[in-house]
Amino acid sequence: MTSVVSTASSHAPQSTGPGAPLLRVHGLKCSYGQAQVLHGIDIEVFAGEIVSIIGANGAGKSTTLMCVSRINRSSGSIEFDGASIASLPPEQVVRQGLVQVPEGRRIFPRLTVRENLEMGAFIRSDKDGIESDLQRIFEMFPILKDRALQQGGTLSGGEQQMLAIGRALMSRPKMLMMDEPSMGIAPILVAKIFDTVKNVLNAQGMTILLVEQNANAALRMSNRAYVLETGNVVLTGSGQDLLRDPRVREAYLG
């Protein structure tokens, strides 16, 4: 694969949106044993944006999300909604409003669709609000309403991805981090998944940080994007600018 020439600054990323970023990551480093995976990456996401992270397999995309979620240990600064979350356990990060839709969906296979969605609201106690949001998810994904009493493990890959997104939304997050939402899904459903992501943003003002191997689809729906290469941010720009960039086209768009 052709290497993208580095144009990213070694300093903190410049603000491109109004006010302070909702998520600001600076100098993020992570290692698996003796192997360093992230080498001090800087990322900003402003409220209401869709921001993508693209790159080859092994570039550190999913590791970045796992570090921000505090599932993986890391060093560096992670600020969300104006406060540091670098020392918080994962469940407290969720309570702050930052929720990840994990790679591979990771739904509860023996629980019903409805029970899976209710698990997404575990930090809430407003029963009326939970029921209202449950019905909203069913409107967003009618197939989940049809499958409400069916075990999650019996759903197709695309249906499980819808369930994973719905489960995350049940916590009423301020920001979603989505890890490879198109992975293992039939092509006919990929467009529906991405359309739903855009509709969520438009309807709810949701902020989304998206990791996606399908770079073309990710860049088309993104306000901005970061290109990762071997644990480093090597290129940043608007989604449309990166779509036109010959280095990105040669390395990632085919």
Image (cartoon, rainbow, N blue to C red):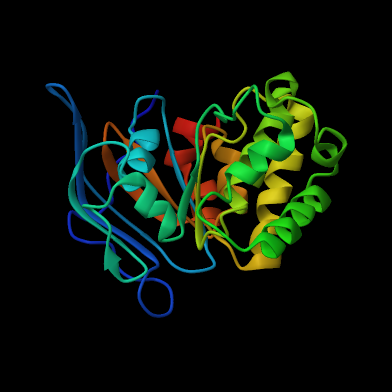
The residue sitting at the left extreme is: 34
Residue 100's place in the image compared with 48, above or below, is: above
Residue 152 rendering spot, x and y as whole percentages: 69, 26
* Frontmost residue, 13 versus 172: 172
Residue 31 rendering spot, x and y as whole percentages: 18, 30
Report the side of 19 relative to 191 (left or right).
left
Residue 96 rendering spot, x and y as whole percentages: 40, 61
Report the side of 46 relative to 191 (left or right).
left
Residue 82's place in the image compared with 165, above or below, is: below
Q: Quadrant of residue 204?
A: bottom right
| Quarter occupied by the C terminus | top right
Report the side of 147 relative to 65 (left or right).
right
Please give the name of the residue rendered at 35% of the width and 48% of the height, measured from the top-left corner.
235
Residue 230 rendering spot, x and y as whole percentages: 27, 31
Please give the name of the residue rendered at 56% of the width and 48% of the height, measured from the top-left corner.
219
Q: Quadrant of residue 205?
A: bottom right
Residue 90's place in the image compared with 107, above or below, is: below
Please give the name of the residue rendered at 46% of the width and 60% of the height, measured from the top-left corner.
97
Report the side of 23 relative to 154 (left or right).
left
* Frontmost residue, 196 versus 234: 196
Please give the name of the residue rendered at 41% of the width and 28% of the height, measured from the top-left corner.
56
* Frontmost residue, 208 versus 169: 169
| Quarter occupied by the N terminus | top left
**What number of labels is visible?**
0
